[in-house]
Amino acid sequence: MPTEIERKFLVEKSIWQKVEKNSGELYRQGYLLTDPNKTIRVRQTSEKGFITIKGLSVGATRPEFEYEIPFDDAKELLNQFAISELSKIRYKIIFEDKLWEVDEFLGDNLGLIVAEIELKSEDISFALPDWIDREVTSEQKYYNSNLTILPFKYWES
């Protein structure tokens, strides 16, 4: 079974603003199913569409099935079947030979910036960029599917 091993971190905004980066890519993603044990997500980038099925997270690991689908199918699924959705700009940054994906959320999640790193195993060590604040891997409120249900702007400080 394919798995995803992913760790999530909050980003220190004042340092992140000074980082040299590309223009990023707009992602629109919506959920056909949001359940604590499984999610079904549709994602649309500027040129592609994807459908992803994710299982229950255990630590930083969970089952994941992801498939590219036609762009227009992704758009139609989002428009007609998504029960919740969000948008974000994703930046891809290489730091010490590791790919970091940094998401600046838009809309009701504006102001939230989360960095993710995918690993081949949970015990791989890696260096943290100086723009990393703290790890939030186990905090479910930072899962994208949960951000569509209780967006960042409604959180108490």
Image (cartoon, helix red, strand yellow):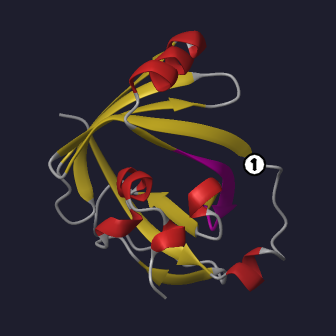
Q: Is residue 127 left or right of residue 147?
A: right
In the rendered view of the protein, which quadrant contains the N terminus?
top left
In the image, what residue type sits under mark 1? Answer: Gly
Residue 5 is at least partly visible in this image = yes
The location of residue 64, given as percent across then percent down, is 28, 38
**Is the residue marked by circle 1 packed among few (<14), some (14-19), or many (20+) residues within 10 Å?**
some
Reply yes or no: does residue 31 show up in magenta.
no
| Magenta portion: prevailing SS class | strand
The location of residue 157, given as percent across then percent down, is 49, 88
x 83%, y 50%: residue: 23
- Return the residue found at the far bottom: 157
x 75%, y 83%: residue: 15
Q: Which residues are magenta?
A: 86-99
The location of residue 145, given as percent across then percent down, is 37, 50
Q: Label 1, on which residue? A: 24
Does residue 2 lie above or below 50 as drawn? below
| Number of numbered labels in the structure image | 1
x 68%, y 22%: residue: 47
| Element type where label 1 sits in the image | loop
The location of residue 71, given as percent across then percent down, is 59, 15
Does residue 140 lie above or below 61 as drawn? below
x 36%, y 31%: residue: 52
What is the quadrant of residue 149 in the picture? Answer: bottom left
| Towards the viewer: 64 or 110 | 110
Q: Is residue 23 left or right of residue 37?
A: right
Residue 101 is at least partly visible in this image = no
What is the quadrant of residue 153 in the picture? Answer: bottom right
| Towards the viewer: 31 or 63 | 31
Reply yes or no: does residue 95 show up in magenta.
yes
Q: Is residue 77 left or right of residue 131?
A: left
